[in-house]
Image (tube, rainbow, N blue to C red):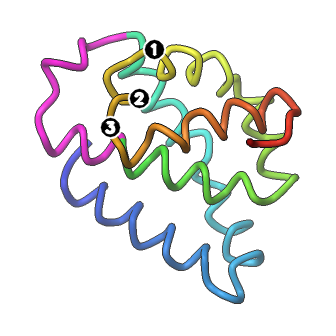
Amino acid sequence: MSQFRAKLMFALRQFCSGTSGESFRQEVGVLLPTVIEELGAVAVGKPFDSLTSDQTDCLVSAVLLLFTLSISPTLLEEMREQGFIDILLKLRFSPLKELDVTRERIVELWELLKGEEPK
């Protein structure tokens, strides 16, 4: 994970949010397994307090990108199939949840993956 990856995920998220975002979301969806795998590696591996600021930025960007992609029912289902809910459970109780930028997104992703309406 690096500063470049964080910026790349930020840019992809911006494109996915635009007016023609749905078709672009499907294109970016091919990255789901990679992004989920990397989040999973951090969630079960390295302690969060040992991450560099670039690594933390990358994790934040990954969470925000996945949240944006979750707008698509197809990609949300793929996240379930990829086992993202187990990773998200670990993230819900990690220092990442304490950051203002990710706190609500992690909870909303959890609710979406569980099939609940976000509050």
Q: Quadrant of the C terminus?
A: top right
Q: Identify the residue shown where x is 65% and y is 27%.
A: 84
State the image coordinates of residue 36 (x, y, percent, origin top left). Answer: 55, 35
How would you classify the magenta stretch by its main secondary structure? helix
Q: Identify the residue shown where x is 20% and y is 48%.
A: 2
Q: Which residue is mark 3?
A: 99
Q: Quote the CA–CA distance across marks 1 and 3.
A: 12 Å
Depth check, front residue: 19 or 45: 19
- The circle drawn on residue 93 is 1
Q: Identify the residue shown where x is 57% and y is 24%.
A: 88
Q: Are marks 1 and 2 in contact (CB under 8 Å)?
A: yes
Would you say 47 lies left or right of 60 here? left
Indicate the amino acid at tag 1. Phe
Mark 1 secondary-structure assignment: loop
- The circle drawn on residue 97 is 2
Looking at the rendered structure, the number of numbered marks drawn on it comes to 3
- Region of the chain picked out in magenta, as a range: 45-59
State the image coordinates of residue 74 (x, y, percent, origin top left). Answer: 86, 52
Mark 2 secondary-structure assignment: helix
Residue 40, magenta (yes or no):
no
| Location of residue 73 with respect to 41 vertically, above or below | below
Q: Quote the CA–CA distance across marks 2 and 3.
A: 5 Å
Residue 51, magenta (yes or no):
yes
